[in-house]
Image (spheres, coloured by chain):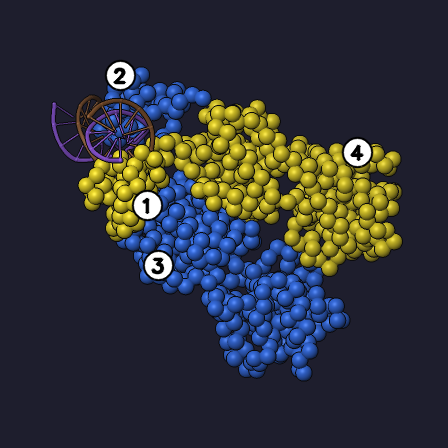
Chain colours: A yellow, B blue, C brown, D purple
Amino acid sequence: MSKKTTIYDIAKVLNITAATVSRALNNNPRISEDTKKLVQKTAKKLNYKQNSLALALKSGKSKNVGVVLPIINRNLFSNVIRGIEEELNPMGYNVIICQTHDDEKKEADIIQNLLNAQVDGIIMSIARHTKNTEHFEQILKKNIPLIFFDRKIDVKGASSVTLDDFRGAYEATQHLIEQGCTKIAHFTVDRSVEIYRKRYEGYKQALLNNSVVFNEDYVLSLESKIESGKDAAKKLMELDIPPDAIFSASDLGALGAIQYLKGIGVQIPQDFCVVGFSNEPFTQFMELTISTVDQSPLLMGKTAAKVFLEQMNADNLKIERRMVLSPSLKIRKSSSRLDYTPS
Amino acid sequence: MSKKTTIYDIAKVLNITAATVSRALNNNPRISEDTKKLVQKTAKKLNYKQNSLALALKSGKSKNVGVVLPIINRNLFSNVIRGIEEELNPMGYNVIICQTHDDEKKEADIIQNLLNAQVDGIIMSIARHTKNTEHFEQILKKNIPLIFFDRKIDVKGASSVTLDDFRGAYEATQHLIEQGCTKIAHFTVDRSVEIYRKRYEGYKQALLNNSVVFNEDYVLSLESKIESGKDAAKKLMELDIPPDAIFSASDLGALGAIQYLKGIGVQIPQDFCVVGFSNEPFTQFMELTISTVDQSPLLMGKTAAKVFLEQMNADNLKIERRMVLSPSLKIRKSSSRLDYTPS
DNA sequence: TTGTACGCGTTATCAG
DNA sequence: CTGATAACGCGTACAA
């Protein structure tokens, strides 16, 4: 186990001082080309590597960015992480991953820990029921950038990168209407969460703008699980006037509904159309591929990372950014009627 | 932007020295209970938080662990990360994520960077074609634990947590034989990669042990993509004597095959059985659920993390660990014949 | 039981 | 152009 070589080691070899070595390595203009070359050469020879911890302590910048999210192994989140990593690693930043498991208390603890570790920025998606913004304000008070993605909360000074959930839902619903559906149901998840509320509102607005009647009985709140989708679909079909389409705020809900409907002999998409949300991989693997709304998670991650980099460069003038990504409706078999051509 | 409070700040308030404060906070037995209480109280009052960077520089331990893998947004990997994070975060470690994109050069660079950042350990799955072990040996030379998961390579001193791919493949093939299949094909991926080679060998051994003939024409090498699975299935069905089952080393390959077979009117599982590998989420979402081999990725991550922790505690006596997890065959519709009951 | 002094590896400031 | 010195915040021998 060889000791790490420091600038002192290379200074000693060259009979100069550590300060000079440091300057030479940092390409300080006030150093002669000769010594620069010399230092760089022996640095390579001794296999010198800058100790980023020392630099971090000195400069107060750790070159680490914290990424905080509910849980890693979900399509949206793992893709966002990928995007962030791909954008930030080339710029010399390391990405620290933390999971809140949708627990507000844990979220606050994690943030404390990250601040403590002197991260240069925090990119996060808030826990499901986070209401308190105190721990977020602490981040900003230390003047370190805070960027929300997907699930955000209003905090003065924080930036955000989100999907236009309203528009995604609007377009999905509009598409269903264009397919000739007139009794369109909606699976929501938890309308206290902004993204789901927005999807609900987009759905409602599309109905309104197209003079399609809005029926409170057609709106069901459920967990994003297959079983819940099945149950909900069953409930819908037992109504006096069952719907002829579902716009589900989750792909799993849509899948459950499809499975139930097929089970009772409903023809999709001839008798009934279904659109989901999120573009989970499985939606295109089914025999009956599922129409859905893509969230471009990779782009979301990259954009969040870019906002962070922008804030780092802007130094003192950190302007609050609100980036809104465009959803992209993926029209597939579950909502493509042969006699209708999607616009 | 209030400055961070240090032990000096709290020392000044109490008219004692920083050393005493440090000791008090670390519960040093040689400090009077009174001053301990006092220090802890004012520490809380001033909202003191230990600066982990300073500690890291001092101690040489960063409390960071590097996790290096080909790509984040894949089921296996994102679940492993989740397992690692859940095990390590409670122990005070932060998890740094880096992607190699299966590029050996990038892999080496990332490792350099992590060593540089003084990570306390590296948990990784190697790039697809990594042959050189030099960068791994550098890790061990610095006496920091190196733990491979899933894709490993032989390096003296490194530990590993892998799935028993041989057994997983063996059991899958055995299961197909028990279903009455006698002409069993195999989709491999890239046999220069250990895990795929092991699956191939497990397949072959199961045939041998059951006196089922091994046919070289039944072994096809393909990318783990739906299209490749379709193409390969087509090739198989065009043989003079087509097979009656496929054990695919990838779920996507299995899915492609199923789609092709259904397309040409082959009844699954009556006429033909298929088993995949990895237990990707979609395998249980299909109407025709796909039998597959589960890799317990969460457990894999947790186990790797535990091996790391063990090595940290063992201090100088770091023993090489080779943990092998048991695969778990998930028998689903794609290979469940009504007249056969799986053992 | 507490204080003094030093080092971890770097960079920045001030001299020269 | 380069050297000396301080400082980042902490822990710890050594001394008292």
Determine which residue is flagged by label 3: B134
Residue B129 vs residue A242: left or right?
A: left
Mark 3 or 1, which is nearer the eye? 1
Mark 1–mark 4 contact, CB under 8 Å? no
**Measuring 71% from the left and 34% from the top, which residue is drawn there?**
A198
Q: Give the camera-side residue of A30 and A55.
A: A30
Q: Secondary structure at mark 3?
A: helix
> Are dots 3 and 4 on a single chain?
no
The alpha-carbon separation of the residues under discs 1 and 2 comes to: 41 Å
Determine which residue is flagged by label 2: B15
Which quadrant holds the C terminus of chain B? bottom right
N-term mark: 3 or 2: 2
Q: Quadrant of residue A323?
A: top right
**Measuring 49% from the left and 49% from the top, which residue is drawn there?**
B81
- Numbered disc 1: what chain? A
N-term mark: 1 or 4: 1
Query: What amino acid type is highlighted by mark number 2?
Result: Asn
Mark 1 or 2, which is nearer the eye? 1
Residue B81 vs residue B134: left or right?
A: right
Determine which residue is flagged by label 4: A205
Which quadrant holds the N terminus of chain B? top left
Residue B318 vs residue A143: left or right?
A: left
Mark 1–mark 2 contact, CB under 8 Å? no
Badge 4: residue crowd in 10 Å (few <14, some 14–19, many ≥20) = many
> Are dots 3 and 2 on a single chain?
yes
The alpha-carbon separation of the residues under discs 4 and 2 comes to: 66 Å
Residue B248: percent from the left, percent from the top?
59, 68
